[in-house]
Amino acid sequence: MGCTLCPRRCGVDRARGEVGYCGMPAEVRVARAALHPFEEPPISGTRGSGTVFFVGCSLRCVYCQNSAIRSPDAGKLFSTKELGELFLALQKEGAHNINLVTPTHYADRIAEALSAVRERLSIPVVYNCGGYERVETLRRLEGLVDIYLPDFKYSSATLSGEYSAAPDYSEVATAALAEMLRQTGEVRFDGAGLMTRGVMVRHLVLPGSRKDSMAVLDLIAKTLPVSKIRLSLMRQYTPDFAPRSAPKCLQRRVTSFEYDSVMAHARFLGFEGYFQTGESVGTAFTPDFSKCVFPKG
């Protein structure tokens, strides 16, 4: 049966080894699974988030910091059963949550794995995605995902087409965001300040795109009650991952004026959440994918 998990709906038979737009057949490949301290404070907590980085992606962001794990040969193969065991191993290591990074093209297998171990998982499951999601696919995850952590990258179809090969991004992400909130309801935290349920929307401010960032915030505020979600406004863009063929504006960092302007607009709209300082810029916070890292147990 042809794959329609992501909005590309390329229709290839991945179960027979055909490769979709995501670059991957149906078999699950994981590049890295470990405790990660560099997510937002209510996600990383004191011990770290149990991040599972999946190989492949249905977007084509020219500035992607995880481009090293797009290859179908990257990482390690996991059966559905092994994937569930991986989640339990991260829990045993002390992870505050199971953090599924770039999971879209494996959503069906992930749902199976989570269903098999859900009764043994006592920590939240985080769906950490690019925001480019089909509502129909998200509905497969209802009752299995506690926290949605999507990007909302662009408002402009021109930018999303040029930077991520997805001119329909804004329309798709808006519908996905509404479905995420429908599933989880208003954001919730435990006594230690860790997020236990809800939606946190990430937006990365890009150089030269200050006005589009403001338009993104307007669109989110128009789509959802801002009091029911949290915003993570990121300034960590670094040109280290952009090829020389990328647009000239992507060859520099975001200025303080650009980020501060967007942050002021977020506050004007009533968003609560998390804002980054200049120290967040650079490659130090990017996971090292040169070696496959997995739990020992």
Image: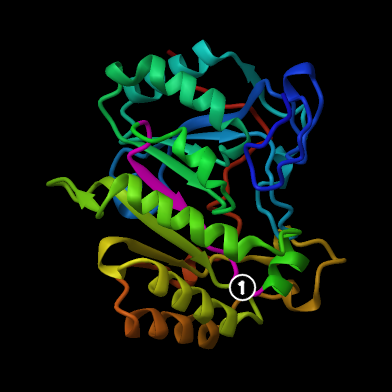
Looking at the picture, does residue 23 appear above or below residue 64?
above
Q: Which residues are magenta?
A: 144-156
x then y, percent, for residue 12: 79, 31
Q: Quick check: can you spot residue 296? A: no
> Which percent across, then down, holds residue 85?
44, 14
Q: Quadrant of the C terminus?
A: top left
Name the dominant secondary structure of the magenta segment. loop
Identified at 76% across, 59% down, the residue is 165
Q: Nearer the viewer, residue 7 or 189?
A: 7
> In the image shown, does 100 or 226 lie closer to the viewer?
226
Q: Which residue is pictured at 28% across the width and 17% down the height?
A: 119
Is residue 201 depicted above or below 56 in this figure?
below
Q: Quadrant of residue 162?
A: bottom right
Relative to 127, say whether 215 is above or below: below
* Colour option used: rainbow
Residue at mark 1: 206
Q: Position of residue 255 (x, y in %)?
A: 57, 82
- Residue name at image x 45 percent, y 75 percent: 217
Q: Residues within 10 Å of mark 1 (few under 14, many from 20)?
A: many
Q: Position of residue 94 (x, y in %)?
A: 31, 28
Amino acid type at mark 1 = Leu
Q: Residue at x 71, y 42 (%)?
A: 9
In the image: residue 148, left or right of residue 15: left
User: Was residue 145 drawn as part of the magenta stretch in this picture?
Assistant: yes
